[in-house]
Image: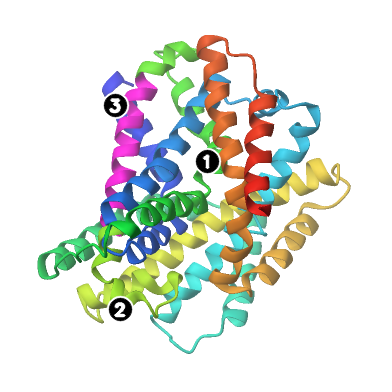
Amino acid sequence: MKSKSLTLSTGLAMFSMFFGSGNLVFPLVVGQISEGHYGLAFLGILLTGVLVPFLGILAMLLFNGDSRAFFERLGKPAVFWFPLLALSLMGPFGVLARCITVAHGAFRMILPESSLWIFSGLACAVLFFLTIRPNRIVPILGTILTPLLLLSLACIAFFSFHSAELPESAGVGMAWESFKQGIFQGYQTMDLLAAFFFSVFVIQHLRGHKKTPDDPAASLPIFLKASVIGAGLLALVYGALVLLGAIYAPELAAIPPQEMLGYIAQRALGPWAAPVVCTAVILACLTTAVVLTSLFADFLRKEVCKEKIHPSVALAATLLITFAVSTLEFAGIARILGPILEIIYPALIVLTVLSISHKLWGWSYLRGPTTMALAMKLLSRVV
């Protein structure tokens, strides 16, 4: 594969890795609560929702995609406990359950009276059969849905920006708060955690070509160029969503976060086009959920239960937890995840930056600064 083609394909792969169902929600929330300071709010989510996850991929690239070697520098217990915590948050106790609530929010734009309990139960049943019998449907859907969602978003943005006016800022006093909310909502995407575990696919894509041997330094030039493409696309999408949230802020005040995109689609494109957008969101949630379900169930069976349970049992346990957590609704899950992410994310950022410094410049101190970042954030929450 030629260098330019490899750079483009890698950049698009990184964008697709981070462009999930939840990423369609939090930028809208950022814009909706920005009080007109959408520029600063966007800068906040740009830092933690775009820059930091791409630093995570860079760190994993420098460690050749070896997550065990990456976490082992925190101590041997971290090799088990950190993946367990991270996969639990990305799996049934967090993102996986949240995927179902986002899908339900989109479904309610088609059938407003639908019950979350029934929808979640049916979704978990579908996830069980799709995961227990892997097939090509999910990868194909993923390939089709990303362009469809981007096209839908472009149409929504075009008609919204054409006919609406941007709100004026509420005053200087809210500027810093808008920036902080952007940073916090960037935590909620959990894309840094995703980078630690999913970046191996991007790294394998790079390694699969003769021009990028196993030496990480040889892959850096292509990676950096590809990152500009992937991060640029993600920033463009986030910027559009933040602006949409700001434009429709008064109307979105009474709309649950998981229903915001569907509502905006109805307002911008009309009642006939909105179901197409909502169906794309539902299917995107489904494809993301299949990957997360498989990942957690596999870790549960192999690492936690030491392969003493059948794969179907691990899968059923994963989805039972997912069902229970999903009934808390999007806002309930966010209330649980929010404080946890606010505490651990600064430490994860320190871990990422220092790991990169270790590989590039020989920086050896890791545990102390990472522990200090965690302790300081815990202390600030207590005080």
Q: CA distance from mark 3 to mark 1?
A: 26 Å
Dot 1 or dot 2: first in sequence order is 1
Q: Quadrant of residue 13?
A: top left
Task: Single out the residue that lies furthest toward the right.
Answer: 308
Q: Which residue is mark 2?
A: 251
* Viewer-side residue, 27 vs 139: 27
Q: Nearer the viewer, mark 1 or mark 2?
A: 2
* Viewer-side residue, 11 vs 236: 236
The relative height of residue 99 versus residue 56 in the rendered view (above or below) is below
**Percent x, y of residue 8:** 30, 31
**Percent x, y of residue 286:** 51, 62
- Amino acid of disc 2: Glu
Q: CA distance from mark 1 to mark 2?
A: 31 Å
Q: CA distance from mark 3 to mark 2?
A: 43 Å
Task: Label 1: state its secondary structure.
Answer: helix
Image disc number at residue 192: 1
Image disc number at residue 5: 3
* Dominant secondary structure (helix, strand or loop) of the stretch shown in magenta: helix
* Viewer-side residue, 189 vs 366: 366
Q: Is residue 5 left or right of residue 30?
A: left
- Amino acid of disc 3: Ser
Residue at 41% x, 74% y: name it.
Answer: 259
Q: Quadrant of residue 127?
A: bottom right
Magenta-tinted stretch: 222-241
